Image: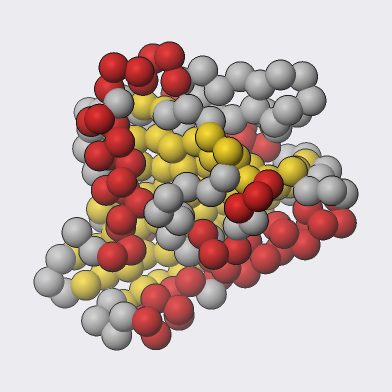
Amino acid sequence: MRRHRRPAVAILAAAAAAAAVVVAASNASAAPGVPAFLDPAELPPRAGAAWYGGAVTSGVPDPLPFCVGEALPGATSRHRAFWTDLDTSAVQVTVVERDASRAEALAGLLDKAVKDCAGKVEQEDPGTRATWRDLGRVQVADGAHVQGVQTTRAETGSDVHLFSVGRDGRTVTVVHWGQMGTFKDAPVSGFRNTTRTAVNKLY
């Protein structure tokens, strides 16, 4: 499996190792004033497979999420991983900044990281072709933006990734969804609904 799909591999491996605790870990409710996370059922449906969710964990995911990982602040991030029994996986990362101005700046940085991702992938791996798409804004709280990146290698096929960056006050959340396939396989409408839910659940 290709370098840029390592997050999916790690998530699926964790699923196999932690199957006995999935039910206990799937509760992402938060104490009052603490941002809540998505539940597995709030991700776009995957035909023939259920979604599972890990525990909400402090810090950034390991390995870092495709495209946005290097822009995430490790000290103030919390994340939750999601996976299916097939090739589809997702991760949500939430950051609480000191004020709304810093949160707005972080959201802009994450947005730019996704927009620049396709060019960066091609530069770092000349054997990969990558395409970026702007998939529009979502009207929720202080706003959210949805983008997509498709990567293709001649010998191994294509992966498609959807990203959303949303903000409510001083809190930013980014959701990354990915699977094997192309843009025509991506559930953009469902992911926009997931984005709206993710931002609405922050507070």
Quick check: 98 left or right of 28? Answer: right
Q: Position of residue 166 (x, y in %)?
A: 67, 47
Quick check: 151 left or right of 69? Answer: left
Height in image: 77 above or below 159? Answer: above
Height in image: 166 above or below 3? Answer: above
Height in image: 53 above or below 155? Answer: above
The answer to whether residue 10 is seen in the rendering is yes
Q: Quadrant of residue 72?
A: bottom right
Residue at point 71%, 19% (across, down): 31
Residue at point 70%, 57% (across, down): 107
Q: Quadrant of residue 3?
A: bottom left
Q: Position of residue 40 (x, y in %)?
A: 44, 26
Q: Position of residue 118 (x, y in %)?
A: 44, 74
The answer to whether residue 184 is seen in the rendering is no
Residue at point 18%, 65% (across, down): 157
| Extreme residue in the front direction | 75
Q: Quadrant of residue 20?
A: top left
Q: Position of residue 73 (x, y in %)?
A: 64, 56
User: Closer to the camera, 25 or 91?
Assistant: 25
| Extreme residue in the top direction | 24
Locate the C terminus and report the quarter of the image it occupies.
Answer: top right
